[in-house]
Image: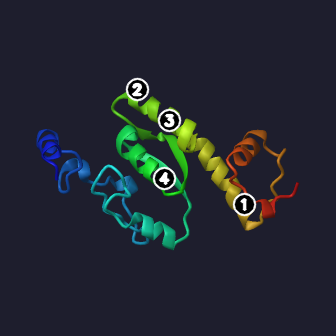
Amino acid sequence: MPKTREERLEKIPICVRGTWDAKIIDEIKPEARDHIILKRRDSAFQDTELRVWLRSVGINTLIFCGVDTSICVETSLRDAFNQEYDIILVSDATASGIKKHYDTTLERVRDYYGIVTHLNEFEEIIKILEQINSGDIQYKPASNERISEFLEKHNLIDTSKVEW
């Protein structure tokens, strides 16, 4: 580890294994079926097997939430974008200790890297996408203007299942 990083961690240890801030809270504890990646740096991709695992299961869109928006979330998000993943950032499921940094990250993601959405809109969109992909409903562009606009703008629909 570089000397400057060691010195910073000695002053303010951040998410060091075995310390209180590295513990996973009960509400988001992994289940037996979850694949666990041990993150060692700001990016979830650096020095981990994350990319190999994502490719092996055919994932091409990543949904980001977490702490700290402007450090770990943004670093992971940028790495994912540069590795050709589609990016969705759920803005109210992420946080930063400095509001200016948080706002800058949201703006940067919107402008360059992907989609920024809110949890309630995201949940609504996921339900509709699941119904479209299962064949339970036919996608009709005029059925819900806001959702239609979002899906079309971000190319999130399987056009082979679209009834125009």
Q: How is the image coloured?
A: rainbow
**What whole-number distance in Å separates the C-alpha atoms at marks 3 and 4?**
14 Å
Q: Which mark is residue 100?
A: 2
Question: Residue at point 53% right, 56% down?
Answer: 85
Q: Which label lies toward us, 3 or 4?
A: 4
**What whole-number distance in Å separates the C-alpha atoms at marks 2 and 4?**
25 Å
| Secondary structure type for disc 1 | helix
Q: Mark 3 — residue?
A: 108
Where does the image place residue 26, in percent across and percent down from the top left?
34, 55
**What whole-number distance in Å separates the C-alpha atoms at marks 2 and 3?**
12 Å
**Label 1 CA crowd tier, 10 Å (few <14, some 14–19, many 20+):** some
Amino acid of disc 1: Gln
**Label 4 CA crowd tier, 10 Å (few <14, some 14–19, many 20+):** few
| Secondary structure type for disc 3 | helix
Q: Mark 4 — residue?
A: 82
Amino acid of disc 2: Lys
| Secondary structure type for disc 2 | helix
| Secondary structure type for disc 4 | helix
Amino acid of disc 4: Asn
Q: Which label lies toward us, 1 or 2?
A: 2
**What whole-number distance in Å separates the C-alpha atoms at marks 1 and 4?**
31 Å
**Label 2 CA crowd tier, 10 Å (few <14, some 14–19, many 20+):** few
**What whole-number distance in Å separates the C-alpha atoms at marks 3 and 1?**
31 Å
Q: Nearer the viewer, residue 55 or 134?
A: 55
Question: Residue at point 26% right, 53% down?
Answer: 23
Q: Which label lies toward us, 1 or 4?
A: 4
Identify whether 158 is placed above or below 146: below
Where does the image place residue 99, in percent across and percent down from the top left?
40, 27
Q: Mark 1 — residue?
A: 131
Amino acid of disc 3: Arg
